[in-house]
Structures are given as C-alpha cells and as structure tokens.
Amino acid sequence: MYTGLICALNNASQVVISDYGHDADLSLVYAIDINLKSIAKLVGSDTIRSFFGVGYIWGNPVDVLTNPAKAYQKIDTMSIDTESYDTYVTSKLSGRIQRSSSTESAIIPEEEKFDIILSADLLFNRSEHSKLLWTIKHTLRREGGVCYVTFSHHDPAKKLLDLNFFTLAREPQFNFEVTFIGQELRKSYPFVESDGLDEERGVVYMYTLTCK
C-alpha cells in the first residue's frame, strides 16, 4: 500500500491500490481508502482524484483494476464515508455497477492497462501463483510495461516453492521475460521465529516481469 501512496504523491496519472476483497468483504480495502482520504486532506483532493482503493481476488475480471472509475462511477475518494466500516461499505458500494462474471467477457484496451505494476510480498501465497500471473498478464501493457516483484521467503526451507512463481511466469501461457534485479537484507524483520533462518527470512528480493 505504501508504495502506491508514494506513487500517488509523485504525479502518477492513475494509481490503483488493491488488496484481497470483494463486495461483501472490504475490510482490507477500508485501510487503503482511509489513507488515501487522509493524504487528500493534506495535498488537496484534485491531486488524488485518479487514485483508487480496490478489493480484488486474483483471476477474476480485471476491469475493476484497469478502469475503477467506471466500476465505481459515482464515487471518488473524498466522497467515501470512512467514519466507520459499516458507513464505509455503504458509501463505497453506493455507486457500484454490476461486474461481469466472466474472465473473458471484456477485452481490456491497451491504453487502460498499467505501465507499472508493483507486486509486493505476494509469493508466499503459493497456491495462487497461476491466478496472480493471469491477472498481471491481463493488466500489464505489452509495450513498455514492467511488473516489479518484491518478496521475502516467509519460510526459507520452502523457498523453491516461492521461486516456482518465476518458472510458471516463463511458461507459454504467460510467456514473461523474467529478470533478477537484486536483493537486500532488511535492518529489521517483523516475523522472528528464532529457528536459525531469520536472517535469510529478512532478505528482500526483486525481479521484473515484462511481456515478450
């Protein structure tokens, strides 16, 4: 979320910050919209009018990501009531249009896709790698688009399962160019297990995905 907020403050034309969620559960997106609204009060609502918090589950129709202004056509960040979660849900959904139930029903124009996607600490969710890659494939611009993938191994003993994400990314159905950028040891790590693997657990890796 924080990288998206930084983009919002550095002249990005549109920023979409997503977390797990759907119309019946927006609890994680609630925190995103609280932060966006707080920033809007500091820098002016016009500055972040094209920045959105969106609930999304990988593998579902991507139009809510690529064109949230249409998915929430009557809502902007400043008009959302964040006083409580219940009032938030009511105001967030008040302008919601019906979403498509088919992942193939809408062709997303290239101009609506993202120049940059930031995938931050998602690879631990190993059972969903294919759905995450599918989502990136359908939202990243073919020409010049870059997905930055950053992560740590939450369980270093099973790091090969995390890295299988990049094996899948190279397969024909996704056909991404995968590039290792670098790694860095965090100065602190929030999940200390005292199992002898904490230093390895604290290493952050960065790769990029681009369309071939």
Image (cartoon, rainbow, N blue to C red):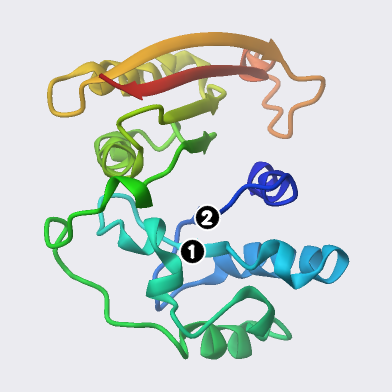
Q: Indicate the position of residue 52 as horizontal and vertical percent values.
A: 56, 64
Please name which of the two marks, 2 or 1, marks the residue nearer to the observer: 2
Identity, as a three-letter code, of the amino acid under mark 2: Val
Q: Is residue 110 left or right of residue 15?
A: left
Against 173, residue 18 (above or below) is below
Q: Nearer the viewer, residue 42 or 144?
A: 144
**Quadrant of the drawing holding the C terminus:** top left
Q: Residues within 10 Å of mark 1 (few under 14, many from 20)?
A: many
Of pointers 2 and 1, the one earlier in the residue sequence: 2
Q: Is residue 42 left or right of residue 51?
A: right
Q: CA distance from mark 2 to mark 1?
A: 7 Å
Q: Quadrant of residue 37?
A: bottom right
Residue plotted at (62% across, 10% down) = 183
Q: How many marks?
A: 2
Q: Is residue 115 left or right of residue 63?
A: right
Tell me the residue that label 2 is attached to. 16
Tell me the residue that label 1 is attached to. 54
